[in-house]
Amino acid sequence: SQQGEEDPQALSIQEGENATMNCSYKTSINNLQWYRQNSGRGLVHLILIRSNEREKHSGRLRVTLDTSKKSSSLLITASRAADTASYFCATDGSGYSTLTFGKGTMLLVSP
Amino acid sequence: KAGVTQTPRYLIKTRGQQVTLSCSPISGHRSVSWYQQTPGQGLQFLFEYFSETQRNKGNFPGRFSGRQFSNSRSEMNVSTLELGDSALYLCASSLLTQETQYFGPGTRLLVL
């Protein structure tokens, strides 16, 4: 079963608007990552936030992590058409476990 | 540095055949993970290799196997292909497990 679950499943906005995607997970983590995938291609790493961090920024991206609620959010500010893609959160577990991905949020940014 | 490369990019096979996919990680990366992506199941972890040892394995049948060579290149093999094996197979490398993974473009496998 998926560790991370993104919400919403799909999001449609206009260029210039902000896009917020949420991720919930079930077990304790060491870190949580967000990836982007364009049209069935390989995934591109966006940002990694560690369990002892609450917020992280990278360019137009802002990620928050609430370990008490087992949730994270990804905010993309001033969206562009080029941001159209699927966005996945990925969590690890304890020990040597590798990443577990959610089913993703499909973001459509219209010009 | 060159990124993760995967070969072949596209593959068409028939049921019952076997297939081998190849992945070359970023230079210096010792961890290679494989994922299967389908519209229905999403991204599912297949296995992870670190320094030629399989450290983790996902919930896939024994028809799915892999290995890693001393230069960190990895191969995965699927024997006795089934229609449901049609998917995008993604390889990712990282310096260490649980750190940022860098993905290749994937191999799209179609089983007829």
Image: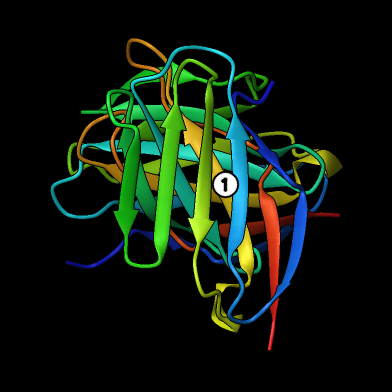
- Can residue B94 be seen here? yes
Name the colouring of the figure: rainbow
Local SS, label 1: strand
- For the residue pair A61 and A90, the one nearer the viewer reads as A61
- For the residue pair B2 and B99, the one nearer the viewer reads as B99
Is residue B64 placed above or below A30 in the rendered structure?
Answer: below
Q: Position of residue A105 (x, y in %)?
A: 68, 51
The residue that appears at 77% across and 48% down in the rendered structure is: A9
- For the residue pair B5 and A23, the one nearer the viewer reads as A23
Q: Position of residue B87 (x, y in %)?
A: 71, 50
Residue annotated with mark 1: A88
- For the residue pair B77 and A58, the one nearer the viewer reads as A58
Q: Position of residue A8 (x, y in %)?
A: 74, 46
Q: In the rendered view of the protein, which quadrant contains the C terminus of chain B?
A: bottom right
The residue that appears at 61% across and 49% down in the rendered structure is: A21
Query: On what subunit does the disc labeled 1 rest?
Result: A
Instruction: Answer with the quarter of the image where residue B94 lies.
Output: top left
Image check: A10 left or right of B96? right
Instruction: Answer with the quarter of the image where residue B46 lies.
Output: top right
- Can residue B21 be seen here? no
In this rendering, the count of numbered labels is: 1
Q: In the rendered view of the protein, which quadrant contains the N terminus of chain B?
A: bottom left
Identity of the amino acid at label 1? Phe
Q: How dense is the environment of label 1, judged by Cα within 10 Å: few (below 14), some, or many (20 and up)?
A: many
Residue most extreme to the bottom:
A111
Instruction: Answer with the quarter of the image where residue B30 lies.
Output: top left
Image check: B28 left or right of A8? left
The residue that appears at 49% across and 19% down in the rendered structure is: B57
Image check: A10 left or right of B48? right
The residue that appears at 66% across and 34% down in the rendered structure is: B79
